[in-house]
Amino acid sequence: MSVVGERSQMYVGGAWVGAASGKTMRVTNPATGEALAELPDAGRDDAWKAVDEAAKAFAAWAATPGLERGKILRRIFELMTEQRDDLARLVTEENGKPFDEARREVAFATGYFSWFAEEARRVYGEIVPPPVSGKRLWVLRQPLGVVGAITPWNFPATMVTRKIAPALAAGCTVVLKPASATPLTALALARICEAAGLPSGVFNVLTSKNSGVIGQVFLDHPALRKIAFTGSTEVGKRLMAGASQQLKRVSFELGGNAPFIVFDDADLAPAADGAVGIKFLRVAGQSCICANRLYVQESIAAKFIPMFIERVNALKVAPGFEAGAQIGPLINAEILSKVDGLVQSAVHSGARLDTGGRRLTNGVYSKGLFYAPTVLTQVREEMAVAREEIFGPVAPVMTFNDEAEVIQRSNNTTFGLAAYFYTRDLRRAIRVAEALEYGMVGVNDATGYTHEIPFGGYKESGLGREGGKQGIEEYMEVKSISVGTSP
Ligand code: NAP
């Protein structure tokens, strides 16, 4: 099979279709600016129809035994595994990330199907002892209904599979609106689902630049019972306000401002490697769990910071298909200008620019949106670069004196997604891990998240969890049944 297909249609009700209006939208390669596809630009009517189709498909899919649903999910896993390189090529083309990184992303995204294929048959209920005689009580979990999923461009495969695999495993049907910058990977996944035997209407993909309009249909259509969204905190808040009208369920994965702390008792080389990996080697820093600010204990700063900068200077910035590429382009001009603005404003306020700090424009960089990996030191908390989510290859470095101070400074943010710290002291590791107000904490490990544990944030970083055994529960209602047994 070819996962690429015609690149001109979207997938609704088991059919490959155009937009009712006939309108189209262009998808471009951010490394070269070249057009990749002209896809349907779905509007309100298309979205309403997609939810209708998902609603029609719901009863039969919900009634399919978990074991059978799991078999189809397992087949999707196998086909994605077979098509890994083609999927990765699409990810690099539309997102820009290096091909090796795209291959790793696709393998990781694929893993959600194997995990939830297994979970599909383990949706247990409970039998509860009644408080009085003449009664039996039990608790069931049932699929919620139609789910509207909205995903961002930074992980075109993972963001989709982390939502649709648990939703399908639970027995829900899904209408997905992927980011308008990266819909091709989502359409390829639809082709794989179709080839794996997923029934028509169970999974639908709308391509559209009218995200507000599609989001409004998700809020308005009475058959749609849940919105699963990954993206900015601002849009998440807007969806949550809208969802209150029909009290729709929501789960959100939103922005982050991850601290990365290096204590004076840490092994410095692994800490420097970890910091470079989680700051720069995930979509050029355009990831919600990227380290956003580095805190280095004052007593080791003179030793650690040069080690970190040396590693940053060795990174290779290049178009994604070039051999050895580690950092690709930023996704659009708006992000590039925001990233550069944060750097210039920090320097203007007294931060020191140790490396980078500029757009790369010569030679292979001339057609894309490349930014030099950047390290800023002498950064202060009040600077925007330390408070806002950077979403780019820029590392602001600050120093601290003691544990209590760095915990307080790390927690002093409205975000709470991921945090990282390095120490060799076991007692400190436990104290700090428990004190950080974050949904995910990496201790001597900046690569910690896997399918087996829940992913999600505290505070304004989100609601609900994806992955782990918790992931499937986000797509289920709980029903209590009370039966009178007296004759
Ligand atoms: P975004 O603007 O919120 O977009 C995310 C998705 O929402 C896209 O599909 C977008 O469509 C859609 N959208 C935009 N406005 C909408 C509206 N009014 N109603 C309904 N949908 C709407 O975010 P982004 O800038 O693309 O992505 C970066 C953000 O996502 C960052 O803050 C990052 O931290 C967060 N993120 C979080 C996680 C996590 O797991 N916590 C993972 C990745 C990213 P268009 O593409 O058409 O604009």
Image (cartoon, helix red, strand yellow):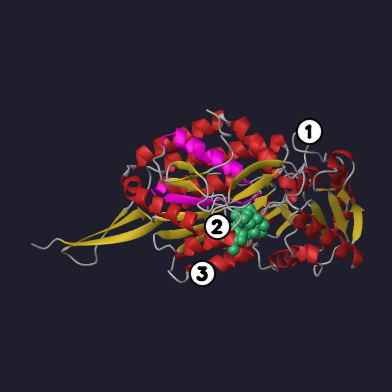
Spatial CA distance of label 1 from label 2 is 33 Å
Q: Along the horizontal axis of the image, is 73 left or right of 184?
A: left
Query: Residue at the location (55% across, 59% down)?
Result: 252
Spatial CA distance of label 2 from label 3 is 13 Å
Residue 194 part of the magenta segment: yes
Q: Earlier in the sequence, mark 2 or mark 3?
A: 2
Residue 348: x %, y % from top left: 91, 66
Spatial CA distance of label 1 from label 3 is 44 Å
Q: Nearer the viewer, residue 301 or 157?
A: 157
Answer with the quadrant where ligand 1 appears in the image. bottom right
Magenta stretch?
170-197
Residue 487: x %, y % from top left: 8, 62
Residue 328: x %, y % from top left: 77, 43
Q: Is residue 447 above or below residue 432?
A: above
Residue 176: numbered disc:
none
Q: How crowded is mark 1: few (under 14 residues within 10 Å), some or many (20 or more)?
A: some
Which residue was labeled with disc 3? 242
Q: Along the horizontal axis of the image, is 126 left or right of 294?
A: left
Which residue was labeled with disc 2? 229
Query: Residue at the location (43% across, 42% down)?
Result: 14
Mark 2 is on which residue type? Phe
Local secondary structure at mark 2: strand
Local secondary structure at mark 3: helix
| Residue 229 sits in quarter | bottom right
Mark 3 is on which residue type? Gly
Q: Nearer the viewer, residue 12 or 317?
A: 12
Pointer 2 residue Cβ closer than 8 Å to ligand 1: yes
Residue 481: x %, y % from top left: 26, 60
Which residue was labeled with disc 1? 322
